[in-house]
Amino acid sequence: MKKGIITYYEFLEALSTIRKFKKQVPLLYNAMEEEVNSISKFVGVDKNTKISRLPLSTRTLNVLKAMDHIGLAEGTTQDLARLSLKELLRTKNAGRRTVDEIKELCLFANLQMNP
């Protein structure tokens, strides 16, 4: 037999394998998508990361903008550690999701928020 040529039987076996794998592709894709989605958007953020470079939601950015002592343009993640949870919750439009987002950010930046 010539080099690189397969028999008809080998072709049928390969085709069967491909058909089986075709059924697995969506399962593998879904598993990989779940794994990627479980990774925090704040991986790689540290206390010196500028607030303007953070992947924050629009609502969270607006809440921070409403807080006078947080500078969005030049402020860093470390500035967020000066916030207290009480102060944050008193700010207009700051709800549970906003607080959770800032808490997650502080966790990844290794910062402790005031209660």
Image: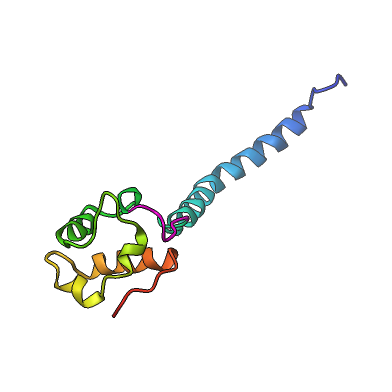
Is 115 inside the magenta-drawn segment? no
Is 90 situated above or below 5? below
Which residue is the extreme one toward the left? 92
Q: Is residue 15 left or right of residue 115?
A: right
Q: Is residue 30 left or right of residue 99?
A: right
Query: Residue placed at 44% from the left, 59% from the top?
Result: 46
Q: Quadrant of residue 76?
A: bottom left
Name the quarter where the C terminus is drawn: bottom left
Is 46 situated above or below 3? below
Name the quarter where the N terminus is drawn: top right
Q: Quadrant of residue 11?
A: top right
Image position, residue 34 (x, y; %): 46, 56
Which residue is the extreme one toward the right? 1
Image position, residue 43 (x, y; %): 46, 57
Image position, residue 63 (x, y; %): 18, 60
Range shown magenta = 44-50
Query: Residue placed at 29% from the left, 51% from the top?
Result: 74
Is 78 situated above or below 26? below
Count of residue discs? 0
Which sits in the foreground, 102 or 34? Answer: 102
Is 35 situated above or below 22? below
How is the rendered protein coloured?
rainbow
Q: Quadrant of residue 79?
A: bottom left
Predominant SS along the magenta part: loop
Query: Residue placed at 35% from the left, 52% from the top?
Result: 50
Which sits in the foreground, 78 or 107? Answer: 78
